Amino acid sequence: MTRTTIIGGGIAGLVCAALAQARGHAVNVIEAGPELGGLWKSTEVALGDYKLALDAGLRLPVGTGEPRIDDAIFHRPDFAFAWHRFEGWPREGAITAGRFNPENSSLDACGLNAQLADVVAEMRQFGPGPAEPVTALDHATAWYGPTLANGLVRDAVLGLFETELDALAPQAVRWFVPRRVILGDHEATARLLADPRLEGRVAHARHQDIPQAISRPFLHPQSGGVSTWVRALHASLERAGVRFILGDGVAAIEARPLPGAVERVVLRSGEELAVEQVISTLAPGLIQRALGAPTAAAPQFRHLRISHMLVDRAPDHSACYGLNFSRHPSFFRVIFHDNLSDLPEGAHVLTFEHLLDDNERPDLAAAALEECCRSGAMPAGTTLLASHSDLYRNAMAVPLLKHVEDAAQQYASLLAPLRNLRFVGRAASGAPFLDQIIREADATLSAIEEEAGCPTQAA
C-alpha cells in the first residue's frame, strides 16, 4: 500500500484524495485552513427576507464522462444526496465591448464591423504557429492575428490582470480567454467552420448550434450549494480511511539528495509524517520555501470579491452566467441564479465576481448591476434591493512572464529531481476546469504506480 500525502485541501486536493483512496493508497491530506474545498464553498447568505445557500461564484462540478473516475468523486455509494445532471452546455453569455450576447461566452468580434474582414483574413494568414510563444501577446497574435490580439483580447486580459499582454506569460491568454471567437451570424459561421485554416478558432453564434456530442456532464447538488458535495466527499473519504489534517500547515519538508526524494513532512504543530509519495496542489514556490530553498519572487495576486444581490426583476434571457470581456470592468463574471436552481417566488438573485488589486474597495454591487443594465444583461431599471459581499485574498495569481520563467527554472533545478513529489491543478498545468484537474490527478496516480512497479488499479 502506497503512503500518499496530499498538500492542500482545496478541490484539487479532494479530487486527488478520492482517486488515491479508490486505488488503494493510504492517504493523508494536509490543509492549513479550518475547512476543505478552497473556493469551492457555499455560504448562508441573508438577502432581504431570504436566507439562501449561495456558492462563492460559479462552481458547477463537471465530470470527465468516464465512470471509473467519476464514480470515485461524484457517485460514491455512501453519499446521502443526489445530483441535478444536465448534458449539453450550460447556456452562457458574454459582454464584449459593452454589449451582452446571451447565446455564447466567447469573444464576439462582430462589433468590429469594418475591421471584421481584416480579422478573418489575419486568422487565415497567421494560425497557431509551431513555435512556442514567449508572451501572452505572442500567443494571442498567433491564435487570433494582430487586430484582434491588440483589440478585444487586450481588453479582456487588461480587465482580468490590469497588465499588458507583453508582460504576461502565454498561459494568461491560454487559460482565461476563450479559444474560439464569434465572427458572424449562423450562416456566416457555418461557412467559416468549413475553412480548415480557421479550424478550432470559430465559435458558434447561437447556443442551439453548439455540438452536443462534445459536451461534458455538468452537475449541481439537488439541494444546498456546492459545500453539500464537499462535506459529503470529506465524510465519505474519512469513513474510507483517509486522514484529514485541518488547521495545520506544512512547516518544513525534509528530502534526501541523490537519488532525490521527499522523506518527511513536518507540520506546524510539530507532527512529522513519513511519506512515500507527495502530491502538492500548492504553488511550487511554497514547497521550495518548505524545503528551505530560496524561491523566486512571489507572484502578483489579485483578490476576489463575491457580491450576492437581490434585485426586483428577473433577467429577460435564459443564460446561466455571463463573462465580461470589457476593459477594466466592475466585475468579470455574473451568475443568474434564477436559471440554476429553485428560489422562493419573487426572488431574483445575482452573484458577481470582481477581481481587485487592493483589499479595501467600496461595495461594487451597484456598479456591477449598472454595467449589467447598460450592456443588456439585465433589464433597464433593475433595482438593487439587498446585497452581501465576501472577500477572498490572493485568489488569483497573475502569470507575469518574469515570475513564470524564474519559477520554471527553480522547479527544474530543485523540485523536478525529487522523484516522489508531483503537482496537480493550478500548481501544475494551471488547468482551469474541474474535469481537466480530475484527469490530471488520475494520470499522476498512474505515473506513481507505474514508477513503483505496482499494477495500475482502476478507480
Image: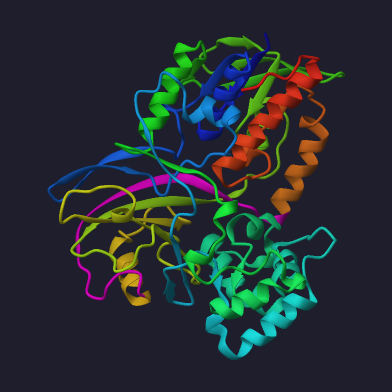
In the image shown, does 359 or 122 lie closer to the viewer? 122
Q: Is residue 439 above or below residue 68?
A: below
Residue 378 as seen in the image, left or right of residue 150: left
Across and down, in percent, residue 385 comes to 17, 60
In the picture as drawn, the residue positioned furthest to the bottom comes out as 114
Q: How is the image coloured?
A: rainbow
Residue 260 as seen in the image, left or right of residue 215: right
**Residue 291 is covered by the magenta coloring:** no
> Is any atom of residue 150 visible in this view?
no
Which residue does the image show at 30% across and 59% down from the upper left? 363
Across and down, in percent, residue 193 comes to 67, 71
Which residue does the image show at 32% across and 55% down from the upper left? 339
Residue 266 occupies quadrant: top right
In the image shown, does 337 or 432 lie closer to the viewer? 337
Which residue does the image show at 87% across and 19% down from the upper left? 258
> Is any atom of residue 89 visible in this view?
yes
Across and down, in percent, residue 46 comes to 20, 45
Magenta residue span: 376-401
The quarter in which the N terminus is drawn is top right
Residue 233 occupies quadrant: top left
Q: Is residue 235 above or below residue 212?
A: above
Across and down, in percent, residue 94 comes to 46, 67
